[in-house]
Image: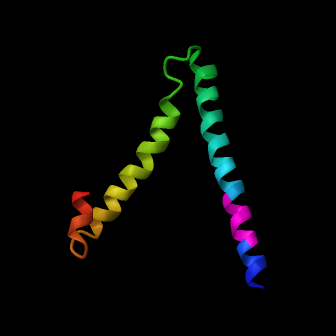
Amino acid sequence: MHKRTLTAVVLSQILGGAGLAAGISVGALLAENMLGSDAHSGLPTGLFTLGPALAAFVVVAAMAGSVPLLFVA
C-alpha cells in the first residue's frame, strides 16, 4: 500500500511539473502570437511568478501576528 501511494504521488508530481512548464511555454508563445512580436512574450512568465509572490505576501501579512519574521523575509 505504501509503495503504491508513493509511486502515485511521485508520478503526479512529475506530470504536474511537466504540465506547469508546458503551460508557461505555451503562454509565452500565445503572447507572441497575439501581440505580433516577441517584445512582450515574457509577460505571461513574469505574471505567473508575480501572482504567487503577491499571494504569499498576503498570507504572510495575515499571519504577521504569529510569525513576524516571515514578513521580513
User: Residue 64 falls in which quadrant of the image?
Assistant: bottom left
- The residue positioned 49% from the left and 17% from the top of the image is 39
Residue 52, image x, y percentages: 44, 52
Q: Is residue 19 above or below residue 57?
A: above
Q: Is residue 31 above or below residue 44?
A: above
Looking at the picture, tell me which residue is in the foreground, 52 or 21: 21
Name the residue at the top extreme: 37
Name the residue at the bottom extreme: 1
Horizontal side of residue 52 vs 7, given as left or right: left
Based on the picture, tell me whether residue 58 belongs to the magenta stretch.
no
Residue 5, image x, y percentages: 73, 77
Q: How is the image coloured?
A: rainbow
Q: How many marks?
A: 0
- The residue positioned 54% from the left and 24% from the top of the image is 41
Quarter of the figure with the C terminus: bottom left
Name the residue at the front extreme: 3
Looking at the picture, tell me which residue is in the foreground, 35 or 44: 44
Horizontal side of residue 40 vs 60, given as left or right: right
Quarter of the figure with the N terminus: bottom right
Residue 24, image x, y percentages: 60, 39
* Magenta region, main secondary structure: helix
- The residue positioned 24% from the left and 76% from the top of the image is 66
Based on the picture, tell me whether residue 8 belongs to the magenta stretch.
yes
Residue 49, image x, y percentages: 45, 43
The magenta stretch is 7-13
Q: Is residue 67 above or below residue 56?
A: below
